[in-house]
Image: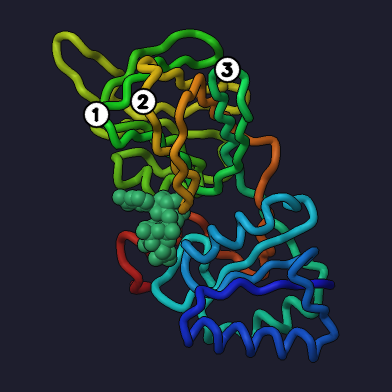
Amino acid sequence: MKFAIKSKGDEKSNQIRARIEQYLIEFDLIYDSEEPDLVISVGGDGTFLEAFHTYNHRLRDTAFIGIHTGHLGFYADWVPDEIEKLIIEIAKKPFQVVEYPLLDLTIYPKNGGKVDHFLALNECSVKTAEGSVVLDLSIKDEHFERFRGDGLCISTPSGSTAYNKALGGGIIHPSLESIQVTEIASINNRVFRTIGSPLILPKHHVCKLEPIHDERSFLITVDHITGTYNNVDAIECKVASEKIRFARFRSFPFWKRVHDSFVSDDRT
Ligand code: NAP
Ligand code: MN
């Protein structure tokens, strides 16, 4: 089996990275950063997002695992103290795999320019540096509303505990193949009206955003990456056909991760 390790880059993460690499090589695994079967992220959830984006072109052949060197993460949910145990489990192979849904995002420019396509593990957000975002939102090709405000966030179930949560979105279990649309400070008064509630869309319910003001440029984030886009004709979001695969060596239920991260980390 071939593996790669992504470290956050701080001293603690680099030390752990070196230890894991040495152990796994002793167990006859091969370090291969080009075509790994297993990617180990050492750091935080942000490090895990980077690992995902480095290898998202080979999701079918790669499984991921996250070790946290700071606070408990949603993707980085192994502690450094468990490394020896984890190494032995990895060396035993084959391992179980758990799959989580992803967001599929396509940005269509006006005038037939280059179409951009992304997969997000957490979310995409659409904002602007100039005034308000004004766009028509449609679902399955039916016009739903004209949105005015700071922007929209479209998240995956596993991303629902990240930016989405801060925007008042619901926490969605990753076994539900869905995306969630949340508003970022919508303008609501007698003239302008939006739904106000987060919308949870199932598979195949494509959500399309069509900007109204041609001249505006948009800030579009995909997880930790931000890009500026001019001449956006439409942005399409849907549940991706691809999934992320996690290597699973022990049970750590999603609701327990939510509890331990946001409610309390004591076990009483
Ligand atoms: P960051 O600014 O370090 O991330 C913000 C926080 O979100 C960090 O504590 C990060 O954990 C945590 N996080 C990432 N994914 C999560 C998840 N699925 N569930 C719960 N918490 C999660 O930037 P970053 O580390 O590059 O992460 C990018 C993410 O930040 C974006 O995808 C977005 O979800 C989130 N974000 C949140 C807000 C907000 O809450 N107001 C605003 C902008 C962006 P670590 O410390 O372990 O990395
Ligand atoms: Mn971070």
Give the mark nearer the N terminus: 1 vs 3: 3
Q: How far apart are the alpha carbons under marks 1 and 2?
A: 9 Å
To which quarter of the image does residue 125 belong? top left
Disc nearest the viewer among 1 and 3: 3
Residue found at the very far left of the displayed protein: 190
In the image: residue 237, left or right of residue 198: right
Res 28 seen here: yes
To which quarter of the image does residue 20 belong? bottom right
Looking at the rendered image, the quarter that the C terminus falls into is bottom left
Q: Please, what secondary structure does the residue beneath circle 3 have?
A: helix
Identity, as a three-letter code, of the amino acid under mark 1: Gly
Report which residue position mark 1 lands on. 131
Q: Are marks 3 and 2 in contact (CB under 8 Å)?
A: no
Q: How far apart are the alpha carbons under marks 3 and 2?
A: 15 Å
In the image: residue 61, left or right of residue 182: right
Res 255 seen here: no
Residue 204 pos. (x, y %): 62, 23
Residue 123 pos. (x, y %): 47, 43
Identity, as a three-letter code, of the amino acid under mark 3: Asn
Identity, as a three-letter code, of the amino acid under mark 2: Arg
Please give the name of the residue rendered at 65% of the width and 51% of the height, measured from the top-left corner. Answer: 244
Report which residue position mark 3 lands on. 111
Give the mark nearer the N terminus: 1 vs 2: 1
Q: Please, what secondary structure does the residue beneath circle 2 have?
A: loop
* Residue 216, label in figure: 2
197 versus 45 height, above or below:
above
Residue density around tag 1, few if under 14, some if 14–19, many if 20 or more, within 10 Å: few
Q: Are marks 1 and 3 in contact (CB under 8 Å)?
A: no
Please give the name of the residue rendered at 28% of the width and 21% of the height, measured from the top-left corner. Answer: 148
Please give the name of the residue rendered at 67% of the width and 64% of the height, measured from the top-left corner. Answer: 248
Q: Do the residues labelled 1 and 2 touch (CB within 8 Å)?
A: yes
